[in-house]
Amino acid sequence: RIWGTVPLLILVFLSWPSMGLLYVLSELETPLVTVKCIGHQWYWEYEYTDFAVVSYNSYMVPEDELKLGEPRLLTVDKSMVLPFSVWCRILTTSFDVVHSWTVPAFGVKSDAVPGRLRESSVKVEMPGVFWGQCSEICGALHRFMPIRVEVVRAELFSKWLWILQSRVWEG
């Protein structure tokens, strides 16, 4: 009996400070932009709610509609847009089955589970285009859920968001 209790007490004693540290480190920086990524079969929905509720769907462009130089199975009709050098919160969830919002260049792989909200933080230090895909076997066509993230200057991001909001307000 003592052989089970003593190690348990040692583990609790060692883990108690770690839990407090993990809680404090979970969000060191306050994010300025929050994007909710909602997985659907077989597309992503992006929702920006910090300034006004703006959402849009991102579908893969079919192979016969690709322009010269666009990558097959990675090109989407509407990219996710983030400002660079700004902390951004990425919330992931799913509408139907388990998906995974994965962008390897950001070091982010966040499972999108129905009924759950997962949080990741990212701060991209250079502008550009970054690619990813759903990396969960979420159905027969899961490979057709590409992710394209455009990282732009903050001024361009706010201008893009303003244009998107004005389209929503117009109906």
Image (cartoon, rainbow, N blue to C red):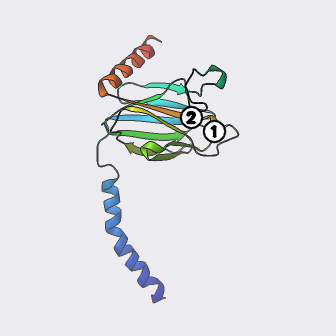
For disc 2, the neighbor class at 10 Å (few under 14, some 14 to 19, many from 20) is many
Q: Is residue 118 left or right of residue 88?
A: right
- Secondary structure of the residue carrying tag 1 is helix
* Farthest residue, direction front: 69
Q: Quadrant of residue 145?
A: top right
Residue 162 at x, y percent in the picture: 36, 18
* Farthest residue, direction right: 140
Type of amino acid at the residue the image marks with label 1: Arg
From what the image shows, is residue 93 above or below residue 49? below
Q: Is residue 7 left or right of residue 115?
A: left
From what the image shows, is residue 46 above or below residue 142? above
- Secondary structure of the residue carrying tag 2 is strand
Who's the residue at 63% across and 34% down the image?
144
Who's the residue at 38% across and 35% down the image?
34
Q: Quadrant of residue 137?
A: top right
Q: Is residue 141 left or right of residue 68?
A: right
Q: Is residue 71 left or right of residue 55?
A: right
Q: Nearer the viewer, residue 57 or 130?
A: 130
- Are circles 2 and 1 on residues that touch, CB within 8 Å? no
Who's the residue at 38% across and 44% down the image?
121
Give the number of the disc on residue 143.
Answer: 1
Q: Nearer the viewer, residue 49 or 85?
A: 85
From what the image shows, is residue 166 above or below residue 114? above
Give the number of the disc on residue 153.
Answer: none
Residue 69 at x, y percent in the picture: 55, 25
Type of amino acid at the residue the image marks with label 2: Pro
Q: CA distance from mark 2 to mark 1?
A: 7 Å
* Farthest residue, direction bottom: 2
Residue 64 at x, y percent in the picture: 66, 21
Residue 85 at x, y percent in the picture: 30, 37
The residue under label 2 is 146
